[in-house]
Each structure stands twice: as structure tokens, then as C-alpha cells.
Image: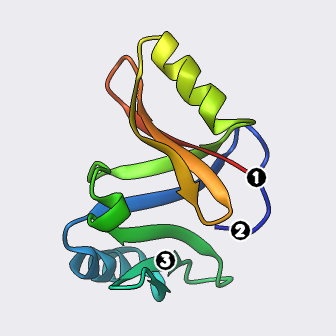
Amino acid sequence: MSDQMPVVGRVAWRDLTVPNAEEIRDFYSAVVGWSWSPVDMDAYDDYNMTAPSGGEAVAGICHARGVNAKLPPQWLMYVAVEDVDESARRCRDLGGEVVDGPRPMGRWRFAVIRDPAGAYAALLSE
């Protein structure tokens, strides 16, 4: 993910959080041609996945442990919002559920929500 705050309303990042991150990292490397680099999580590594042309990090593949233990095993898009805490409150008010957070993630704040139809998304702000 870039160090600059993305434009509000845009998809800023994609993560896949699974119990077997190395296996799934290797699967996507073979299927779509991504290379990978480790992201130090203290006791283990998660992975930034990089496009075959241009060297741009395009997604993360993460272990479902530690701070990520509650995240669902699916591709999760992070949408930039003005204020994660306010957006999480609105989510609850409108019949959604806050599954994780709001909490810090590096210099950002994020929350994982489930909308009234049952679909998951993450919200991201500074």
C-alpha cells in the first residue's frame, strides 16, 4: 500500500487473509505471475504481492493470526474514507456490522465491516 492517503471513495488496497499464507502466496505467484516480498509482522511474515510488469505492489496475502485472526478468508478491498470511526458508526446505524476495529494499522486506521447483504469490506483513513 502506498504511503499517501488514497482518494476518498476509491479502493486503496486488497488483502487476502488465510491460515496458509505461504501456500496461497505460491498459488497466486504461479497462477497470475505475481512475485512477492515479505512484510515483517514480528513473529512471522505476511507478503506484498507485486505485478509482473512495473514492480508495483498490488495486494497482500496475510496469515490469519495475531491482529488478523478475526478477518474472513476472502479477498478484502480497503476503501478510503474521510473518518473510519464515523464510517463505522454509520455502518452500524444502517444495519451493517463492524467485524474488526476500528483500530490502527501502521499510520492508518481501519475497520472491517459487513454490509446488510452480508458482504465484507474494509474502511481506511488517516
Residue at screen point 36% across, 69% down: 62
As helix, strand or loop, the secondary structure at mark 3 comes to strand
Where is 10 relative to 62, above or below? above
Q: Nearer the viewer, mark 3 or mark 2?
A: 2
Q: Position of residue 47 (x, y in %)?
A: 43, 79
Hey, what amino acid is under mark 3? Answer: Met
Q: Which residue is mark 3?
A: 49
- CB atoms at circles 2 and 1 under 8 Å apart? yes
Hey, what amino acid is under mark 2? Answer: Ser
Describe residue 13's horizontal placement relative to residue 54 as left or right: left
Where is 25 relative to 111, above or below? below
Q: Quadrant of residue 57?
A: bottom right
Hey, what amino acid is under mark 1? Answer: Pro
Q: CA distance from mark 3 to mark 2?
A: 13 Å
As helix, strand or loop, the secondary structure at mark 2 comes to loop
Which of the two labelled residues, at mark 1 and mark 3, occupies the earlier sequence position? 1
**Nearest the camera: 79 or 64?**
64
**Nearest the camera: 58 or 42?**
42
Q: Quadrant of residue 107?
A: bottom right
Other residues around mark 3 within 10 Å, as few (<14) / some (14–19) / many (≥20):
many
As helix, strand or loop, the secondary structure at mark 1 comes to loop
Q: Which mark is residue 6?
A: 1
Residue at screen point 70% across, 36% down: 83
Q: Nearer the viewer, mark 1 or mark 3?
A: 1
Q: Which residue is mark 2?
A: 2
Q: CA distance from mark 2 to mark 1?
A: 8 Å
Q: Position of residue 105 (x, y in %)?
A: 56, 60
Which quadrant is the N terminus positioned in?
A: bottom right
Q: Which mark is residue 80?
A: none
Describe residue 100's horizontal placement relative to residue 85 as left or right: left
**Nearest the camera: 89 or 32?**
89
